[in-house]
Amino acid sequence: MSERLFVKELANGMTVLGQQMDHVSSAAMTLVVRSGAAYDPPEAAGAASVACEWCLRGAGDRSTRQLNDALDAMGCQHHESVRSEHLLLTAAQLGRNLPAVLAMFADILRRPRLEDETFAPSRALIEQDLASLEDEPARKCSLLLREKFYPSPLGRCIYGSPETLGALEPAMIRGHVRQHVGPTGAILAVAGKIDWPSLCDRAEELFGDWPATEPQVQELSGPAGGVTHVSKDSAQAHIALAYRSVPIHHRQYYAARMAEMVLSGGASARLHTEVREKRGLAYHVASHYHSLKDHAGMFAYAGTRPEIARQTFERIVTEIRRLADGVADAEITRARTQLRSALIMQGESTSARASALASDWYHLGRVRSLAELSRATQSVTADDVVAHLRDCPPGEFTVLVIGPEPLDTSILDC
Amino acid sequence: MSERLFVKELANGMTVLGQQMDHVSSAAMTLVVRSGAAYDPPEAAGAASVACEWCLRGAGDRSTRQLNDALDAMGCQHHESVRSEHLLLTAAQLGRNLPAVLAMFADILRRPRLEDETFAPSRALIEQDLASLEDEPARKCSLLLREKFYPSPLGRCIYGSPETLGALEPAMIRGHVRQHVGPTGAILAVAGKIDWPSLCDRAEELFGDWPATEPQVQELSGPAGGVTHVSKDSAQAHIALAYRSVPIHHRQYYAARMAEMVLSGGASARLHTEVREKRGLAYHVASHYHSLKDHAGMFAYAGTRPEIARQTFERIVTEIRRLADGVADAEITRARTQLRSALIMQGESTSARASALASDWYHLGRVRSLAELSRATQSVTADDVVAHLRDCPPGEFTVLVIGPEPLDTSILDC
């Protein structure tokens, strides 16, 4: 597999990344700017989410309606979301429509209209999305866990609260957009049917004169950690827990990912086998790795009947702790094959590659080829995994439970 | 784009479909057998779901553990699910591992162990999944709507009820598997890095001597239709509604899909514009087309605050009815571009193509190339859409609401 990867850094701090993929007609794009929920002032939590919604309400020469029409007329499938550290825009379309779509996203970021009359409906939608969390306890559980697990404000709920949302004003959001939506640290990653020189010219034309912004420094506190029970008359006990792992730029990153595979990388993995298959404790049980720039964790979740919640929780904790006792070579061999296979399949998706390039640049300041990723994952041994778990033991758990009864977590003291 | 599509019908009633895609390394597979929830005896509703879970608990020479290990060792990402008319197995892996994975799925379907000791945990998981629905009102709403909308038992909830699940016995499920899991009407569709002659040989070897089954004829009754309110102390009102459309084999199918695009095919579509953007009534609002063999519908959903539930419902109904008044050429042009773009992007995904081939064969008895699909969608005019809506007006709505208050649906009588 030949991989044609390109990097161009604009003078204002924005980076353009590209992967030219032959034999496809589509071009996928990931665009991140430093306007995540962690940059919201505490009294204005939810500002980034409202800003994201509001920026789509007309930009440049186009009204909301004209903008939506124009993106759909390009066959562009796009999605906008707010993360902890970033505002994330993704789009997939035919390669030949990329230049036109890029111009629209440049308008959205650089020339959003932010008109008074579209502010209230934008905020109303975020209020609705926040309210809908009450009917999705599994999603709420994961969001609240992040809040407790990461140092504040990195894990902050992207929706804020009814109070902070209610207090937002148009002028404040306009200031937020001016301060945070800029080229400093911004990344545009494109994969698929692209012509790299033309893409660079287009990016320079659309973003080259975007004035640099002054990135705000975040003061971190916490994390809160501990065990939190949110009482709810739900049918299931929703159990989420997290423990510290190493971030993507850490030298033990690949060992950490391999540990994750052994724990939860398929039907043969330990959580699936011990919790779901042998004991039927939970229909859904899984863990996943998540990394911010300098903080990372392993996050596990299970939804189960309240009367077996304690048993489920204890089994998950036991399996996590048991990892440090050793990992069989067969488990590592399977994990390697799964990772290699997953990498090759990701390599066939323009969207997956655009997203990976942007992530690499943010976390590592460079892009990794699939060949490098494959080599790195193939070289991790069972000893590396155990050494990692000894250096970075899953000692302190942060636990978040939503359900009718508090959970007995005394196993954490053993 | 050259499309190499192949069809081979085995003597026992099973069909093998293939699309050879150059420049990819993966091969995705969709395998459907006629063992959907609609074939469950009424007193044993949920049998297909338990059977699906149980069939994965060891097959052929392999125990549960060995089977899970072996699939993961092939880097196989697989998923099993029960639908109304089918048991659906999907798998994606490197093309070179496809022959080995196929053999495992032949074991799962033809030689499941179905041992007494794995029955209870299999059933317990389905009971858990059913219970988890109570904490996912949006999902529950959609499932209950199907039950009311389709003639019984086509829309039946795949989980059955606590009572029917509790009454299931191992012997009964074994009989169910013998009767329904067979080659009659079964479809194996593979797309990606395949060698068609070898795939045919392999399929013949693994499935050629699978004895034909006697397909049960379903007696249909209903549908129930009407307006149903499920009282729940939820934060949101979950509103789902459906109306009759034409099935995939109908000559107006493409016009129906185009109507769907105009209604809900992107941010410029009518539901998004009128419900979400202009009025901020619901964060999530969308409709989609769904087709069984001979029955099809358009299904819309919105989750919203109870106090604006009526307004939201009336707006959705109004937009659906307004379709028949006429569709602008600009809307059709956008919908065509979106569909063409989506088709080309699906054509780059082995999983999407395998799934589309299987669906084509089931619904049409032949496979459609992307070129044919593209031509057909590009030729639909605004007049075709309006003519379709006049022939098949969204007259009778089936409505399902989960929320704290009954919904005023008097607009349906206007």
Image: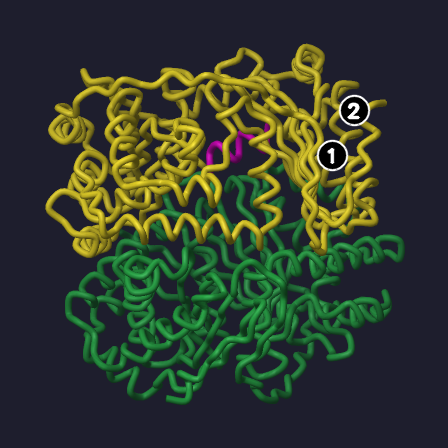
Chain colours: A yellow, B green
Q: Quadrant of residue B223?
A: bottom right
Task: Report if residue B254 lies within the magenta region.
Answer: no
Q: What residue type is labelled 1?
A: Arg
> Residue sitting at 76 percent across and 71 percent down?
B176
Q: Residue at x 18, y 15 (%)?
A: A11
Is label 1 in a helix, a strand or a loop? helix
Q: Check if mark 1's residue and mark 2's residue have beta carbons within 8 Å.
A: yes
In this rendering, the answer to whether A167 lies above or below B164 is above
| Residue position marked by numbered label 1 in the rendering | A270
Q: Provide the chain ID for the residue under circle 1.
A: A
**Residue wearing tag 2:** A322
The range drawn in magenta is A336-345
Is residue A340 in the magenta section?
yes
- Density class for disc 2 (Cα within 10 Å; few <14, some 14-19, many ≥20) is few
Instruction: Report if residue B62 is visible in the image.
Output: no
Magenta residues, dominant SS class: helix
Left or right: A114 in relation to B120: left
